[in-house]
Amino acid sequence: MYTVIFLQTDGGSTLSTMLPFLLMFVVIYLFMIRPQMKRQKNEKKFQSSIAKGNKVITTSGIHGKILDIVDSDNTVIIETGAGKIKFERSAISMELSKKLQAPKEKK
């Protein structure tokens, strides 16, 4: 025995059926896609503003000071406690120079 169910619509209300999908797309864009694009833009801006003498932290957690920037292969040479290490520009996650110079907030 098979039961057949017919779905009925009221004719020309395609907008009311598409509205939940449109709202879902808008919510996904506002809460997921847009913030990720903004984060990528800020990260690219940070990586292009890296200069010699800045104290930085790499994505692997290594602290050091930038000695030289090699633009031809997009790498930087960082001086750490263990010596000099060559990193890709994209491996630098944070700059400490600005954080160290900023005044501390009072609680």
Image (cartoon, rainbow, N blue to C red):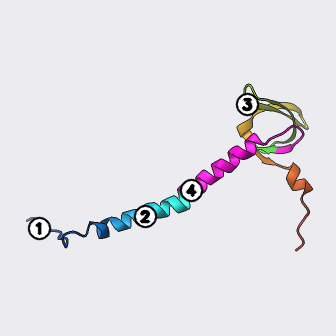
Residue found at x 87% / y 43%: 54
- In this rendering, which labeled residue sits more in front, label 1 or label 2? 2
Q: Which residue lies at the image location 49% right of the left edge and 60% below the top edge?
A: 28
Query: In whole angstroms, how far apart are the C-alphas of marks 1 and 2?
Result: 32 Å
Q: Label 3 vs label 2: CA separation?
A: 40 Å
Numbered range of the magenta stretch: 33-56
User: Magenta includes 9?
Assistant: no
Q: What element carries label 1?
A: loop
- Considering only vertical position in the picture, is 49 above or below 37? above
Q: In this view, does 96 lie to the left or right of 15?
A: right
User: CA separation, marks 3 and 4?
Assistant: 27 Å
Q: Is mark 2 on a helix, strand or loop?
A: helix
Could you tell me if the residues under marks 4 and 1 are in contact, i.e. CB atoms within 8 Å? no
The alpha-carbon separation of the residues under discs 1 and 3 comes to: 66 Å
Query: Residue under circle 4?
Result: 34
Where residue 106 appears, as percent x and y from the top left, is 90, 72
Q: Which of 48 and 28 is in front in this view?
A: 48
Q: Quick check: marks 1 and 3 in contact, CB under 8 Å?
A: no
Marker disc for residue 24:
2
Q: Is residue 59 visible?
A: no
Q: Residues within 10 Å of mark 2 (few under 14, many from 20)?
A: few
Tell me the residue that label 3 is attached to: 74
The residue singled out by tag 1 in the image is: 3
Is residue 45 visible in the rendered structure shown here?
Answer: yes
Q: Give the residue type that dot 3 points to.
A: Asn
